[in-house]
Image: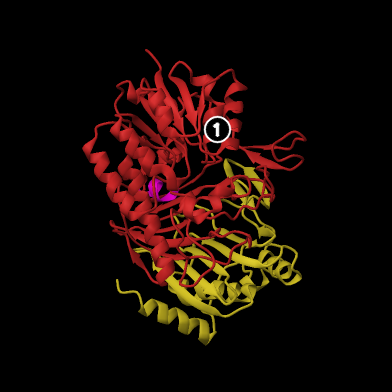
Amino acid sequence: MKPISLVIAGAANPHVPGYLRGMAQISDDVRLLAISEDDSGRLDASRAMLRAQDVDVPGFGDFRRMLDCHPEATAILVGSDNAHHMPMYREAFARGLHIYSMKVVTMLPEEMAELAELGREHSTIFHVELELRYHPQFQKARELVRTGKLGRIRAISLSNISQSPICYFPNWGVPELSYGKRVPLTPGASCFRGGALTDHPHPFDLIRWITGSEFAEVTAFSSRNQRNYLEVEDHLVLTGRLRDGTSVMVNPSYSNLEERGPLRRLFWPKSLECNLKIFGDQGCYYADYFDHPVLVMGENHASPNRLIVDGTPRLVRSDSMLQRFAHRVRGRAKSEEDASLEDGLQAVKVMNAAYESLYRGMTAEVV
Amino acid sequence: MNSDHVSLRDWGVYRKTLSLVQDGTCGELCSLRWTWLSALGDAALIYTGVLAHLLKASEKLAGGKLLRLHLEPVSGVPACFALAAFEGGVVAELEIHEALPPPAPAVRFLMADFTGGRVTNRPLVGHHHAEGAFLAINGGAQAIHFESLPVVREALEDEEIQGTIVQALGGIKR
């Protein structure tokens, strides 16, 4: 089967380098045509990553010009800052392109409404990168809950705690770029929306996906920042209730400290704590993102000469998320793990309710 | 060696964390995470006992008064989530479950995040205590802790904290 023809619009999202570095390995499924990025430094760095694996494609400073030059493209990977997603979506919908988008799609309610409308009007595939759904330990959680093996679910707690990427992706700490505008966390605060919560839609998506129930209300608290140089929040924790009555607690913070510098170097030895606990009438289930870890220390490691907890490849090789997207573009049916535009928007509704709760100092309904 | 009861105040992890807070070893305290799970807890003491003791300990670590408390009771079981804000901008999250399915081991974790570091007894990977010894014999297996995990067997006699909890409970409409 022919590979899909993909263009990449924007490389501002910290996840984009991972896709660039893996592009040669998925050439049977994805043929990259071009990449655009309005920051010339990021564009050069991105093209260098591609050339390092013998993928040499033209680079553009403007995504519309890239699309004009490549009418043969069938799909677009949107990897810009969150604030720049919307013009790219509009253009992609207008040109009939299938969309593979970094999260979050947008945090602004007016854009969310427009995006939902565009999604209803067009039949193209819109895949949101919500990657935790593909991990077997979280798929097991869904199976246990959906088959009733844990009995009635009473409570769920889920952490999504990482290091802050803002030192090596400074754009991630600019409220206008990450959240879309400058909104103080609380009235008069000098810390703004657009930090750890905006960066972590996964727990909200995962809880919806596992239980099949939507969030009804949330109450959020945020501590003083660990990093006093950030303009955006690095801590937030919330409790809430799903429409089926399940109580939840979610911590989506940047509490794992890192070196302050231009490279991603961890201080805390684990990049991500993503621990899930589900309590039912008939049992409980605990899962950890790092369920088969190794300990690494190496002088040439990305975090040199430091003990690091790292994951290991799965025994059974599965397709990458971008390959799965390519299979769908070529006609394969949507699988239950694939996150849609609606999934992306629903997660953002919960996150915005959390920000509202924090701002008002009271419980906020998720609408 | 293996006493049946360690009070929270005497628990080594809490005492060590408190001393590190007071020494400023990790900078200034920002947030606390308590995970307090047990199969054999006393349901009657969940708010006036366990929660009150954890809040009192949080207040001591935060070095400032409790300003705001939000409770999320879990329906049908003696469990709750709680969020607490203290003077100075410290926030504590508390996860309490006093009736786990009996094979599930008790868990007592504290994580304290600072401007310049972290203190915790939470394992790097997984959900259970990694410290202590492990014994497998005659087909059974058990972890052995030479200092027992702390339990709460009494209500906290602190009118201010109790009053705050009662007020928070009164605010829950369901």
Q: Determine the secondary structure under disc 1.
A: helix
Q: For residue A50, say whether it is visible.
A: yes
Q: Nearer the viewer, residue A113 or A63?
A: A63
The vertical placement of A20 against B39, above or below, is above
| Amino acid of disc 1 | Gly
Q: Residue at x 49, y 72 (%)?
A: A188
- Position of residue A139 measured from the top left corner of the image (x, y, whole percent): 41, 38
Q: Nearer the viewer, residue A51 or A268?
A: A51
Which of the 4 image quarters holds residue B141?
A: top right
Q: Is residue A52 rendered to the left or right of residue A175?
A: right
Q: Which chain appears red?
A: A
- Quadrant showing the N terminus of chain A: top left
Give the chain of mark 1. A
Say if the magenta span includes residue A205: yes
Q: Which residues are magenta?
A: A202-208
Q: Nearer the viewer, residue B101 or A132?
A: A132
The vertical placement of B167 against A150, above or below, is below
Q: Residue at x 69, y 48 (%)?
A: A261
* Colour style of the rendered protein structure: by chain
- Position of residue B1 measured from the top left corner of the image (x, y, whole percent): 72, 63
Question: What tint does the image give chain B?
Answer: yellow
- Quadrant showing the C terminus of chain A: bottom left
Mark 1, Cα crowd under 10 Å, few <14 / some 14-19 / many 20+, is few
Q: Is residue B117 rendered to the left or right of residue B66?
A: right
Say if the magenta span includes residue A55: no
Most common SS among magenta residues: helix
Which residue is situated farthest in the bottom direction here?
B159
Q: For residue A149, say whether it is visible.
A: no
Q: Residue at x 53, y 59 (%)?
A: A232
Which residue position holds label 1? A18
